[in-house]
Image (cartoon, rainbow, N blue to C red):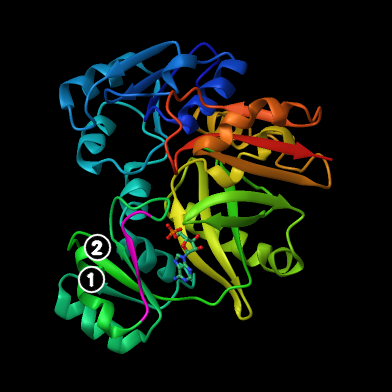
Amino acid sequence: MTLAPGSTIGIVGGGQLGRMMAIAAAQLGYRCHIFAPEGEAPAIDVAAAATRAAYDDRDALARFAAAVDVVTYEFENIDAAPLAALAEQALVRPSVRALEVTQDRLFEKSFAAGQGGRPAPYRPVDCLEDLRAAIDALGTPAILKTRRMGYDGKGQARIASSDDAGAAWDAIGRRPAVLEAMVSFEAEFSILLARGADGATVAYDAPDNSHVGGILATSTLPARPIVAAQRDEAVALAEQIAAALDYVGVLTLEYFATADGPVLNEMAPRVHNSGHWTIEGAVTSQFENHVRAICGLPLGSAERVRPHVEMRNLIGEDAHAWREILSDPAAHLHLYGKAEARAGRKMGHVTRIW
Ligand code: AMP
């Protein structure tokens, strides 16, 4: 089914990913309706309509579903149950199943492993005793991550020795978790795959991603040779997973490039920060291809337009340097319109291509 331009796309989540998705949708002649809880919602500034309600407000979701032609999401830390109810009423792309698999680290890892992927060695942890046993099994250093609701390094605790078990368990709020062995990697990269409603796919070049404090700092292309060498294998897994989930939209897989090949870190059922470079750096941006996919349009080329691309996140007060950034005539500045530059907050990004 094709949703013609002029149709309304419902976006669950009001952050910068929704904002850039809505801008891409508007360019193609679609209207966007944002569903977001109270509070700052950068996507609403650029959208045609908004519903402000909690993510589990079923009545508000039902009204939202009735007002739009397709529902997508830009944020995966929402309870799947209300979205599943919504899916009985409206077309939801990507599917609620994709959300369920990827919002739980344990399901995600076992699902990916079942599709031939290789996550870091891991163990489920439901209590302190489990954690001690997992540390014995995997050794240290290791990293404890909550199964749900973790992002940008939140809900994680590093474990240097078995003495850290109690403190780490407290630090993550004693919630269901997984313990992961620390991977010794040479680089981090991501695969962004767009899959259309007809099953056609396009994959972007894999950028070299650097993180500071668990938050993405830069995405750079061309990536180092180890990343380029592992890209095709990493794309093949993304295609396999997307097909298994009958996925429609942009799917992101984050990897560690290790001496033994790509190790899957995590997946996101959505457009991704490490794909922001595609706005200026690729023929068709991740946001436009997501819109094309969920509306049943043909996908656009994912080819890179210039040899060199660098995307740098503006975190917290970095965004105050907008004048200086603009003094480089080649810089593409994106600011998300957030009022307060709190530490660790993604305020914008800047991309250079040459
Ligand atoms: P995550 O939120 O799981 O993507 O973790 C944030 C960052 O922490 C990653 O991008 C890595 O730099 C680091 N990290 C997470 N898990 C591991 C691991 N198993 N081994 C080594 N580094 C990790």
User: CA separation, marks 1 and 2?
Assistant: 6 Å
Magenta stretch: give its range: 154-160
Report which quarter residue 320 is drawn in.
top right
Give the residue type that dot 2 points to: Ala
Check if residue 159 falls in the magenta segment.
Answer: yes
Q: Is residue 173 left or right of residue 268?
A: left
The percent coordinates of residue 232 (x first, y second) are 67, 63
On the rendered image, what quadrant is the C terminus found in?
top right
Report which quarter residue 143 is drawn in.
bottom left
Tell me the element at label 2: helix
The front one of 307 and 243 is 307
Q: Which mark is residue 167?
A: 1
The percent coordinates of residue 28 (x first, y second) are 61, 18
Give the residue type that dot 1 points to: Ala
Check if residue 303 falls in the magenta segment.
Answer: no
Q: Is residue 120 left or right of residue 250?
A: left
**Residue plotted at (37% across, 17% down):** 68
Residue, disc 2: 171
Classify 289 as above or below 183.
above
**Residue plotted at (21% across, 35% down):** 82
Can see residue 282?
no
Tell me the element at label 1: helix
Q: Residues within 10 Å of mark 1 (few under 14, many from 20)?
A: some
Q: Residues within 10 Å of mark 2 (few under 14, many from 20)?
A: some
The percent coordinates of residue 201 (x first, y second) are 61, 46
The percent coordinates of residue 115 (x first, y second) are 45, 67
